Amino acid sequence: MLKPNDRTFTAEQVRLIGPDGDQLDVVPYARARELAAEAGLDLVLVSDRSTPPVVRIMNFGKLQYEQKKNLKAQRKNSAAQKLKEVKFHINIDDHDYETKLKHALDFLEKGCRLKITLALRGREMAHQELAFELMDKVMADLAPYADADGKPKLLGRNISVNFAPK
């Protein structure tokens, strides 16, 4: 937002909004500056594209503070969209499988995106069908809680698929 007190502002008539948010009237720019000075506040340009331009009597420092605060809150909330990863192996025990699945569900409940990776070691590369069966099982167990971004893909020695929380 710009302050119309700047020398670049050249409108003769402006639509004035008071400090309470009520629309006062279309007044000359000089009169709007006088009213802002009487109130001890700033005259802030709200919309310069409308005819006549809209200005508001308000505390400009407070406006800047609130905008910074809102921007910081937005950045804080957007950081919650992290990508969490849970790794599996083909020869995983049932209890270990359930534990890793529980961790994956916790990540999804927190709103994080999830990446499931199944790492193949040594001779396990010769039995990729077992790995894809395990990935299908994981996808079926996570289906009520998350949407898969596609089918599992083999990249090098890892099979991975991403999930987005429902």
Image (spheres, grey):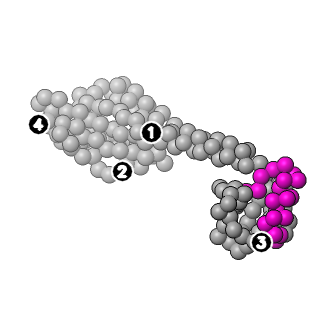
Quadrant of residue 99 within the rendered picture: top left
Foreground label between 3 and 4 = 3
Residue that mark 3 sits on: 13
Q: CA distance from mark 1 to mark 2?
A: 15 Å
Q: CA distance from mark 1 to mark 3?
A: 50 Å
Q: Residue at x 41, y 49 (%)?
A: 147
Q: Earlier in the sequence, mark 1 or mark 2?
A: 1
Is label 2 in a helix, a strand or a loop? loop
| 93 and 37: which is toward the camera | 37
Say whether residue 56 is magenta: no
Residue that mark 1 sits on: 82
Locate residue 10 relative to residue 114 in the image: left or right.
Answer: right
Is label 4 in a helix, a strand or a loop? helix
Residue that mark 2 sits on: 149
Q: Is residue 135 visible?
A: yes
Q: Earlier in the sequence, mark 1 or mark 4?
A: 1
* Amino acid at the residue labelled 2: Asp
Locate residue 83 relative to residue 69 in the image: left or right.
Answer: left
Measured along the vertical axis of the image, is residue 24 above or below residue 92? below
Q: Is residue 143 visible?
A: no
Point out the residue furthest to the front here.
7
Point out the residue furthest to the bottom here.
51
Q: Are marks 1 and 3 in contact (CB under 8 Å)?
A: no
